[in-house]
Amino acid sequence: MQRSPQQQRAQEGEQRTAWQQHQARGESEDRTWQERGGYDGDRVPTVYYGRHYGRNHLFRVYSQPFMEIGGYPSFQYGGYWFSLVDPVPVVWGNEWYQNDDVYVVYANSGYYLRDRSYPSRPEIAISVTF
């Protein structure tokens, strides 16, 4: 579905506000899924994951469908919705969602969003929604 220029601007403003409100206030607000007690959300089938996710499948969050799910900024990529569970790391900057290449990984018993500019840490714990 093609959006009008007005609809496009409205969505851009909505995204900008949501991502910036979800920015971390300090250096270490992120936690692993193990620290949270384990991941208990939906899971992407292994074969499908290998074809659509991982460090070889880069994208920019800004260009993906966006909505807030349960108060968390969420984006759709590769056929699934992903919701941020952690605040966005301070080091990623205010406009990471528009400028940075990111990818989804399954590691340490949960899903994470990683920024190619910061490949190992910090990362954002995310949950998958079908």
Image (cartoon, grey):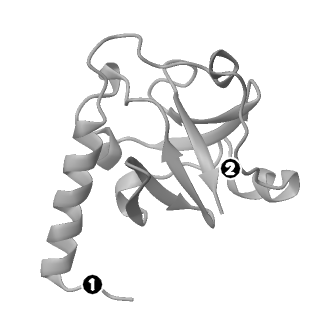
Nearer to us in this view, 35 or 1: 35
Nearer to us in this view, 130 or 44: 130
Image quarter of residue 108: top right
Mark 2 sits on what residue?
53
Mark 1 or 2, nearer chain start:
1
- Choose mark 1 or mark 2, whichever is in front: 1
Helix or strand or loop: what does disc 1 sit on?
A: loop
Which residue is drawn at the image coordinates 30% and 12% (left, top)? 26
Q: Residues within 10 Å of mark 2 (few under 14, many from 20)?
A: some
With respect to residue 114, does 47 lie above or below? Answer: below
Specify the quadrant that holds the C terminus: bottom right
With respect to residue 8, does 91 lie above or below? Answer: above
Mark 1 is on which residue type?
Arg
Whole-percent x, y for residue 50 in the image: 79, 51
Mark 2 is on which residue type?
Tyr
Whole-percent x, y for residue 27 in the image: 35, 10
Mark 1 sits on what residue?
3
